[in-house]
Image (spheres, rainbow, N blue to C red):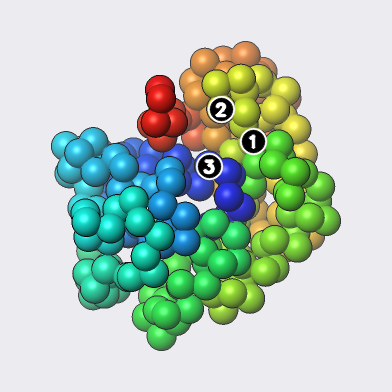
Amino acid sequence: AGHYGSGKTEFAVNLALSAAKSAQVTLADLDIVNPYFCSREREEELADAGVTLIAPAKSTHHADVPALPPEVARIFADQDRFSIIDAGGDDAGARVLGRYRPQLDAADPDLWIVLNANRPQTSSPKQALALLRRIEAACSRRCTGVVNNTHLCGMTRPEDVLKGAALAKQVAGDAKVPVVCHLATQEIFTQISPGDLSGERFPIVIRMKKPWE
């Protein structure tokens, strides 16, 4: 979960493709608030990697229709699969998780909040922590980790990642949870020395493209 534009869908898709190399993976696209930059846009790529995608019907892929796919129940029934839920933006998007509160309580999954320090609404620790708390309240679950995905799309610089790392560390400390990882392309990571960025690095490939790209 995370703020609009945080890159949570980019993380969800990259995580699913990475995990699919060694496990059976299901990715549930539950972003029914904003129909842009959704996991379902990468349906063919996910299928080629063996990832099972659960998403709204194709006829509503680009419609702002608050309809949840009934297949979501499968991710709670099959405990042998590695399942990822890509929630909608902000607390409004996370609220849909409340629909599955009994199943989530039983499964006790991680709730990771993706942060982008370059978004005005989450550029300070106070703002980012406030968003984290609103998301927790909306889905009735506690955050278990923070993911640093600070970027400026194709203009991302190493300094952006480092700025996000500082924000993530502060927010994670205030929330008493760990920083799960830092996201960036491998090209960006090669420009950051090990001593400048502590914690796990998760190299990603930019897969969520703008319509004109």
Q: Amino acid at mark 2?
A: Cys
x, y percent for residue 163:
75, 33
Q: CA distance from mark 1 to mark 3?
A: 8 Å
Q: CA distance from mark 1 to mark 2?
A: 9 Å
The residue nearer to you, when weighing 57 against 126, is: 57
Provide the residue designation for mark 1.
150
Q: Quadrant of the C terminus?
A: top left
Quick check: can you spot residue 66?
A: yes
SS for dot 1: loop
The answer to whether residue 157 is above or below residue 31 is above
Q: For the residue carrying disc 3, how many other residues have a C-alpha within 10 Å: few (<14), some (14-19), or many (20+)?
A: many
Q: Is residue 141 left or right of residue 105?
A: right
SS for dot 2: loop
Provide the residue designation for mark 3.
7
The answer to whether residue 74 is above or below residue 50 is below
Based on the displayed image, in which of its 4 quarters is residue 160 positioned?
top right
Residue 153: which disc?
Answer: 2
